[in-house]
Amino acid sequence: MNKALFILHLSPPVHGASKVGDSILNSSIIKENLNSRFIKIKSSDSIDVIGKFNFKKIIYFVELFFKVCWVLIWFRPRKIYYTASPFGFAFYRDLLVSLPIKIYTKLNKASIFYHYHAKGINDFVSESNRNLKLTNFLLKNTNVLLISKLMRDELNQINSFRNVFYVNNGVENTLSEDFFKNILSQREANNMISVLYLSNMMKDKGYNTVLELANQCYKDQITNIEFNFAGGWGTKEDEKYFMKYVADNKLDDIVRYNGLVHGNQKIKLFSQATLFVFPSQYKKEVFPLSLLEALSYGLPILTFNTGAISEIINDKIGVMSNKERIFDDFKRMIGNSQTENCYKTCREEYLNNYTVEVFEKNLLSTLTNN
């Protein structure tokens, strides 16, 4: 059985890369086919410090460096999977941690797979010739994993890697088909339009735009509607903005913040929702897991054309809008998409393409065949 070392982000904090890391760690498919060891990349204790430097990150880097060296010496893996960061302090951390890995692979027949969950490679290497040389050094003779073919432009200036592979994200199927049928029955019996935003509570992710939709609905006296928000705050300022906006515009009756949800609370929010809204303009957005979770509950999606979202959304399961026309698109969706056939189509899209099993099989195939 192939030996594999996975160096990856795990929860907490909760974000796209850590959710993917959690699914790899808990994957029965990976465990059955690879003799694996896992090392957590610990760099941030909360969402709001991601991308910012603090002294703790130095300590976490030293700890990571020696853990990797120890496992390389005593475990001697043939496949090395690394969740890489395209820029910032995390890039230099990955670069330094990769030095013993590169030495090891030169002395042994081992393959490196760098998995990028965020955009930013092309912007980073465009800043300076030094950044270009360092990134080429990092990726020299390695395999690069990208979440989507729409990310391929990220590597336009890089010529040192061996291969590039595409592995779409996937999320766990938390519903039985009987449970899903029960959800459909409840939606049909309830005239309430229940809008859900579930992601990190950051303006770049679009929670403020969803608040504006709620405010417009209140002004237009649309009474059979509610807006549920869930996710961790990006910053204290985001929390203050949200609370003040709700109070100033008298939205307490239709807007509810549910906090950072897990387990049954998360299942309840998705089950009771009838529309998922995610107007993200986040510059690092690629393949949001929240959209895949929404599809798993049969929810049509209103979103923006950011990152690789256009690879996920088609006109049968959602609408890609923009800031200027979002309220018009929103009104059309709440009038047209609240049907059983629409919910079933969204669910089928998920089952065919975005289950965690599909992701794990694609990842395993990429690791074992290259």
Image (cartoon, rainbow, N blue to C red):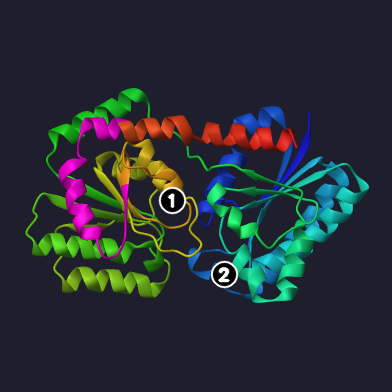
Residue 309 is marked as 1
Tell me which numbered mark, 2 or 1, is placed earlier along the sequence: 2
Taking 311 as reference, is 320 left or right?
Answer: left
Q: Magenta region's main secondary structure?
A: helix
Q: CA distance from mark 2 to mark 1?
A: 23 Å
Question: Residue 99 at what x, y percent from top left?
Answer: 83, 60
Q: Is residue 303 visible?
A: yes
Question: Residue 93 at what x, y percent from top left?
Answer: 71, 66
Q: Is residue 325 magenta?
A: yes
Quick one: SS at disc 2?
loop
The residue drawn where x is 77% and y is 50% is: 142
Closer-to-camera residue (229/293): 293
Q: Amino acid at mark 1?
A: Ile
Which quadrant holds the C terminus?
top right
Vertical comparison of 293 with 180: above or below: below
Taking 75 as reference, is 84 left or right?
Answer: left
Q: Is residue 308 magenta?
A: no
Quick one: SS at disc 1?
helix
Q: Are marks 2 and 1 in contact (CB under 8 Å)?
A: no
| Mark 1 crowdedness (10 Å alpha carbons): few <14, some 14-19, many ≥20 | many
Total labels: the figure holds 2
Question: Residue 176 at what x, y percent from top left?
Answer: 37, 26
Q: Over which residues does the magenta segment extend? A: 319-344
Vertical comparison of 180 with 304: above or below: above
Taking 163 as reference, is 183 left or right?
Answer: left
Question: Residue 5 at what x, y percent from top left?
Answer: 75, 44
| Mark 2 crowdedness (10 Å alpha carbons): few <14, some 14-19, many ≥20 | few
Q: Which residue is mark 2?
A: 51
- Mark nearest the camera among 2 and 1 is 1
Q: Amino acid at mark 2?
A: Gly
Vertical comparison of 265 with 361: above or below: below
